[in-house]
Image: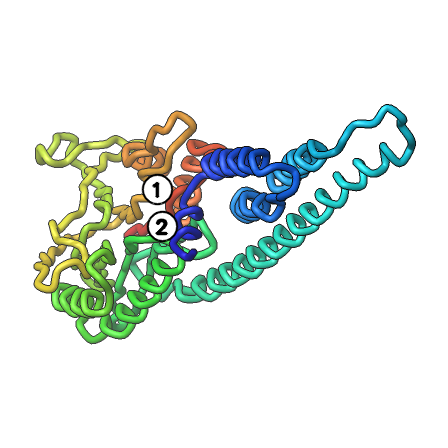
Amino acid sequence: MEFILNHLSKQSKLSILIRAYLTMGIIAILDSISGPQVSGYVFYLIPILIVTWFAGRRQGLVLSFISSALIFIHIMSGTQPTTNYKVVDILIPLWKFTETLVPLIVITVVLAAMKKIEEDKLQAEFKLAGEIQSYLLPQSFPGMKSLHYTGMCKSNACVSGDYYDFIPVESNKLGIAVGDIAGKGISGAMLMANLQGLLRSFAPMYGENVVELMNKINHCVYTSTDASRFVTLFYGVYDDLNHSLTYVNAGQSYPILYRRTTNQHNPSKTFKLHKIGSNFFEKINIDSNSTVLGAFPDAAFTQQKVQLNRGDIIIIFSDGLSDARDYQNDNYGEDRIAAIVEGNADLSPIRLQEAIMNDINNFVGDQIQFDDMTLVVAKVI
């Protein structure tokens, strides 16, 4: 029975309705073959109960009316016609139809109400889980003299598998993390909470040795989850004194660095030069070619360091932003993120973050958000 219910829960409403009506048709045929002396009334309950639970009360009521009509036809097929019609000849068939219909309606309504109660209870639990999870994200941002920054996470459900954090490593150093958990729902949220606990526990211990930190977290995630559960994570340590960022990018979308430059000539074939107002910026994808966390016991991580200058802008995001889709199923893409940065480079990180999210919301429109969106914006001042 559990296997059947699990199978049905994965089917679409249309598939369930088609199967229910086919089942009801088979029952009606067998009922007619058996004759009016034997009633298959109880067997009509099977498709009604399944449809009510998996497709909703309205479809269950429709099936109840149809089933009652078939049962009524079956019962009346054994009634001898009379030529002397009386009122009772009309009331008796009506009563027989009613006594078959009412119990089916009552069962349908009660079952639908039970399902609604279960859904409301589950929704309340998810909402509570989402509220608890929101407190795992940074509630305050440690102050940095040379860095203004902000972050946000927009979940596509009550709970999220995305994660961002700002962790004080030392008095003058800040850990910046953006992660994405493989999987959604409660399982993703639980792994996200585990990742948050690991980072906040170990990040201050390892300081700028982010490779050793990644090795430690990789070991913990790998030993506590199965191979299908892994984490993509960008983690960097910003030094407030020398304006450097030491980082490992473990499978996360490439953060974008906009570096202000006075040279109007392209300094490297790998860099793309952008003019923003009267200033020129190099657009640089930050990567360290490291694998994801938790998938392999002996994963290797590469640590890199980038020197930042005043006016540089760093955009760190999860793939939920770049993969957001419009009604034509086109992805938002990283180029649109870059275009918003180019047009709003003089804004504060908070305003720049709002500009990016507003543009994504306008692009997506009424389409359903199918993935979590996390965005961190930082500017060196």
Residue placed most toward the observer, 218 or 64: 64
Image position of 369 (left or right of 252): right
Can residue 143 be seen here? The reply is no
- Mark 2 is on which residue type? Thr
**Dot 2, crowdedness within 10 Å: few (<14), some or many (≥20)?**
many
Which residue is drawn at the image coordinates 12% and 68% (left, top)? Answer: 212
| Image location (x, y in percent) of residue 190 | 35, 64
Which residue is drawn at the image coordinates 23% and 54% (left, top)? Answer: 232
- Mark 1 is on which residue type? Leu
Q: Against 194, is 118 above or below?
A: above
Give the secondary structure at mark 1. helix
Residue indicated by mark 2: 374
| Image location (x, y in percent) of residue 371 | 37, 45
Image position of 192 (left or right of 133): left
Which residue is drawn at the image coordinates 30% and 57% (left, top)? Answer: 147
Res. 54 mark: none
Q: Against 82, is 160 above or below?
A: below
> Image quarter for residue 32?
top right
Q: Give yes or no for contact between labels 1 and 2 (Cβ–Cβ under 8 Å).
A: yes
Residue indicated by mark 1: 321
Residue placed most toward the observer, 16 or 265: 16
Image position of 277 (left or right of 107): left
> Image quarter for residue 176?
bottom left
Give the secondary structure at mark 2. strand
